[in-house]
Image (spheres, grey):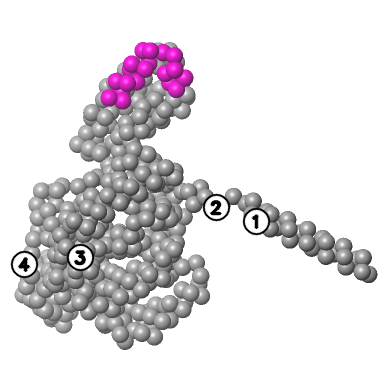
């Protein structure tokens, strides 16, 4: 019996010793292993970020930003308006008729009406070369926007837009309760907006694709393909825009190694692509390893990628390549904007359902490795203001809520967002935006018990919030 105990004791000692040695000899976890960017690139970006932070300290100490002009009012959807009745209904709206009077006129069906927050913003439409007005309306559940074709003067009458469909008109109309007013944002929040413009240059665009060049032909690329087909025939119609196949790529990849004429034509195609801003994915692939990262980055930026559907990750992969090349070439303005686009899932897609968004990551940890105040930066992209710089970066509330669930400082995030929601010195629209951010964060938490607990705490404290937030809190489940 004693011998058995001794053997068991020795075996237990050996197991514990082995575990201890294994623990000691395990390599330290590499925080860069699963990230887009290398350690050296991150370190260089950190130095750039440090210099921008110093620049931020030299900015205007008390920046001024003002809320969108806003008030409370009524929004109504009217449908089933006949062509001959449209002028009559417009006349009622222009005279400021009440909902009861509109209903009594029997010119339309009142599909929906609600008491909401209403705000507006005047801006210049570059495409149409004219000033337009965008109306925002809603509450802490949802804020929608509708563009009016021209400027309007706020008055007691209805503002409205109409649409024609199936021989009938439908209207969306807004009427304010009180005059529109705008307030100065508190300095604490103004500094957060200012920090965004310091770190994310409003003047920089990731894409250098020029829509005016759409349909233009890269003549040098045509020459390259024509020359290739003489040596490597294939049954294809060349047309104005050469369609390079995978076999073409494989052939050119090898031919570029030994054929001086192919290299000459290829160099010409690269040069013309950059000059005319005509992107081509095959040129990008062939240029990899033959041209500098700066040139590769330029080739990526002149090509626009549009996703076909929710599951098409081509736009995000293309932007990821841009972000990686910007990191390698230490081009901070391009890097930070492209990485934020990945985080906010800001890409063009022909369709985009919610199930597709779930599978796309936020890549929040990469930002935290830069040793910048990430919370200040990202929360600064949430605010709406009437005097933001053109090109100011706005965040996607749904994506940001999900991103902060991955933060090592989630508790600080919760504290700051709740403060914004409860701050009476902040305008109603922005308080609603931060409420939507917080609920997005709660519902994205992987810990369902923690999510339920936070929603329950909101409901218990609903009376502390204004009516346009509390009525939405009561509907949460």
- 334 to the left or right of 247: left
Please tell me which of labels 4 and 1 falls first in the chain: 1
Q: Is residue 101 above or below residue 141?
A: below
Cα distance between the residues tagged 2 and 1: 12 Å
SS majority, magenta = helix
**Residue depicted at x 8% and y 64%:** 152
Query: Residue 153 shows which numbered tag?
Result: 4
Please tell me which of labels 3 and 1 falls first in the chain: 1
At mark 4, the secondary structure is loop
Can you tell which of label 3 and label 4 is closer to the viewer? 3
Task: Report which residue position mark 2 lands on.
Answer: 29
Q: In the image, which residues are magenta?
A: 251-271
**Residue 315 found in image quarter:** top left
Cα distance between the residues tagged 4 and 1: 71 Å
Please tell me which of labels 2 and 1 falls first in the chain: 1
Task: Report which residue position mark 3 lands on.
Answer: 190
**Answer yes or no: do the residues labelled 4 and 2 have beta carbons within 8 Å?**
no
Residue 460, x across and y down, in percent: 39, 85
Please tell me which of labels 4 and 2 falls first in the chain: 2
Query: Is residue 68 in the magenta section?
Result: no
Query: Is residue 257 in the magenta section?
Result: yes
**Residue 106 found in image quarter:** bottom left
Viewer can see residue 315: no
Query: Residue 23 shows which numbered tag?
Result: 1
């Amino acid at each position: 019996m004693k011998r058995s105990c001794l053997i068991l004791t020795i075996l237990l000692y050996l197991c514990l010793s082995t575990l201890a040695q294994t623990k000691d000899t395990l390599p330290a976890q590499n925080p860069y292993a699963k990230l887009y960017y290398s350690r050296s690139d991150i370190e260089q970006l950190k130095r750039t970020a440090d210099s921008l932070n110093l620049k931020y300290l030299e900015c205007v100490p008390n920046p001024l930003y003002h809320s969108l002009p806003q008030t409370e009012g009524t929004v109504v959807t009217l449908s089933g308006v006949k062509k001959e009745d449209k002028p009559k209904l417009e006349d009622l709206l222009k005279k400021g008729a009440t909902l009861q009077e509109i209903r009594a006129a029997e010119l339309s069906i009142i599909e929906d009406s609600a008491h909401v927050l209403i705000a507006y913003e005047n801006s210049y439409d570059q495409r149409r070369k004219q000033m337009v007005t965008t109306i925002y309306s809603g509450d802490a559940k949802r804020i929608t926007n509708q563009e009016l074709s021209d400027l309007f003067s706020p008055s007691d009458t209805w503002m409205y837009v109409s649409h024609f469909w199936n021989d009938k008109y439908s209207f969306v109309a807004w009427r304010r309760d009180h005059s529109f007013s705008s307030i100065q944002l508190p300095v604490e929040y103004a500094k957060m907006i200012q920090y965004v413009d310091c770190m994310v240059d409003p003047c920089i665009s990731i894409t250098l694709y020029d829509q005016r060049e759409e349909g233009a032909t890269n003549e040098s690329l045509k020459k390259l393909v024509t020359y290739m087909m003489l040596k490597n025939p294939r049954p294809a119609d060349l047309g104005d825009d050469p369609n390079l196949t995978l076999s073409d790529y494989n052939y050119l990849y090898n031919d570029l190694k030994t054929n001086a004429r192919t290299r000459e034509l290829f160099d010409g195609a690269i040069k013309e692509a950059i000059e005319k801003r005509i992107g081509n994915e095959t040129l990008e692939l062939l240029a990899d390893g033959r041209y500098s990262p700066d040139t590769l980055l330029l080739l990526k930026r002149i090509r626009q990628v549009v996703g076909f559907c929710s599951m098409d990750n081509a736009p995000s992969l293309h932007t990821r390549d841009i972000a990686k090349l910007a990191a390698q070439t230490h081009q901070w303005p391009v890097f930070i904007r492209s990485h934020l686009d990945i985080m906010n899932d800001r890409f063009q897609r022909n369709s985009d359902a919610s199930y597709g968004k779930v599978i796309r990551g936020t890549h929040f940890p990469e930002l935290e490795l830069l040793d910048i105040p990430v919370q200040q930066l990202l929360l600064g992209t949430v605010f709406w203001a009437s005097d933001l710089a053109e090109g100011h970066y706005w965040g996607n509330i749904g994506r940001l809520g999900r991103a902060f669930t991955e933060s090592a400082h989630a508790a600080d995030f919760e504290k700051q967002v709740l403060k914004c929601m409860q701050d009476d010195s902040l305008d109603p629209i922005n308080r609603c935006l931060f409420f939507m951010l917080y609920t997005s964060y709660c519902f994205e938490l992987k810990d369902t018990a923690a999510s339920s607990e936070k929603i329950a705490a909101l409901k218990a404290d609903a009376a502390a919030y204004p009516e346009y937030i509390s009525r939405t809190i009561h509907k949460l489940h």
